[in-house]
Image (cartoon, helix red, strand yellow):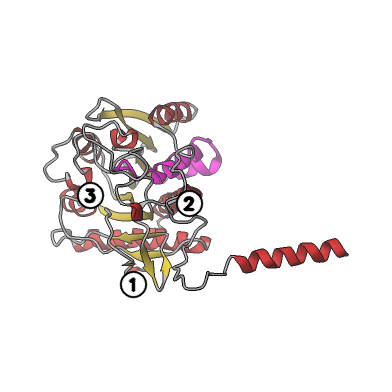
Amino acid sequence: MAKAWMKAISGLFLILSLFVVPSGIQQAFAVGNGPNYNGNETIKKERVKNYEEMVSFLEHVTSRSDLLELETIGQSVMGRDLFLVTFGTNPDNPTIVFLTQQHGNEEMVTEGALNVIKNLSTNSRQVRELADSVNVLFVPRLNPDGAEADVLFELEDYVGGGLLTRTNANGVDLNRDHTDLTQPETRALHENVLQKYDIDYLIDFHHQGTSQAIDGRYVSGSMLYPTNSSVTPEVVEGSKQLGKVVYDAVEARGFGLIGRYNGGTANTIARNGLASTYGFSTLLFEMRGMTDHSREEAVLGQKSNGYLIKQAEIAMTAAMEAIADGSILEADTSFWDELPLQRPIGEEEGE
């Protein structure tokens, strides 16, 4: 009995300690299970596959399934292969693209995509039924040079010492290159994916800084549909429906808090440019925190990796399933009118 009481009391003190804020310190609590980078921890990448590990993983999981295909769509500035994984090949079915890591320092979204690809390699009855109803295209890690910090400029100003970079090896932001297509990575995406396949939906996954919040709580992510005036109302509506599906799936899990992203209208970014040029629905989904950056504010401690990866995985799975069963067409987009705009505690860099 005494041991039981001691265990109960210890548990109570542990619970209470989670809510105690030292006197004089203002704190905006974060959703999920990880803290901000606080300047006295080491930035680590053990949870994340490097380029060689990613290639090996993709070759292995696609080889064990007749529903998955792996192809090379081009090369990066530094000569690394860029990959496309396809699931489902029926031209009569709707098609969605999951695009990750245009920015090399935004890597948990790629880990989420790799988990989903692994799940689709199981050849289970559920997976085969999904393949009968939807086509899925994965473009994982469009910026492998940035992810490896194999670049043609100096990195001494990065918090983690330059483990990875936002831009590609030429110092170009790939998500500002969807109009001019000056870089081999963006040309490969457009010529060998976007112009080759009949696409209906695309989610562009990113990471934003750590300081965005709603009502004093840090968000786990944010979303936005295309806002350029050249995008047709039908495409915008489909984009909003895609956002509703993702929002509901994340909210249902209880550890996420999603805000509305305050994005611009330029067609140089994927969210706007791809919807305008190709006429398919697009959604921007920004996860909280980056692995390395020149601003300490943007870096999130590695203890957050698990829930960020899971959040990406949840979003992708929900989108596939809603498109496959047609329920996306019934999604109520009026929720966007009430979705709170996230507010920065400091300045942000995203998309």
Q: Amino acid at mark 1?
A: Ser
Mark 2 against mark 3, which lies toward the viewer?
2
Q: Is residue 325 above or below residue 261?
A: above
Left or right, residue 194 beside residue 213: left
Q: Earlier in the sequence, mark 2 or mark 3?
A: 3
Which residue is painted at 11% across and 42% down in the image?
Answer: 180
Q: Is residue 102 magenta?
A: yes
Looking at the magenta stretch, what is its main secondary structure?
helix
Q: Nearer the viewer, mark 1 or mark 2?
A: 2
On the rendered image, what quadrant is the N terminus found in?
bottom right
Give the mark nearest the N terminus, 1 or 2: 2
Task: Calculate the distance from the C-alpha at mark 3 to the C-alpha at mark 1.
Answer: 24 Å
Q: Which residue reaches farthest left?
A: 180
Q: Are marks 2 and 3 in contact (CB under 8 Å)?
A: no
Q: Secondary structure at mark 1?
A: helix
Q: Residue 302: percent from the left, percent from the top?
A: 47, 47
Which residue is at a point 50% across and 63% down the rendered structure image?
Answer: 252
Q: Are marks 1 and 2 in contact (CB under 8 Å)?
A: no
What x and y, as percent, mark residue 20? 57, 70
Q: Which residue is mark 1?
A: 334
| Amino acid tagged 2 | Ser
Q: Which residue is identified by label 2? A: 304
| Range covered by the magenta-colored residues | 101-130
Q: CA distance from mark 1 to mark 2?
A: 31 Å
Alpha-carbon neighbours of circle 1 within 10 Å: few (<14), some, or many (≥20)?
A: few
The picture quadrant where one finds residue 103 is: top left
Residue 270: give its label. Answer: 3
Q: Residue 220: which disc? A: none
**Amino acid type at image mark 3:** Ala
- Label 2: which secondary element: helix
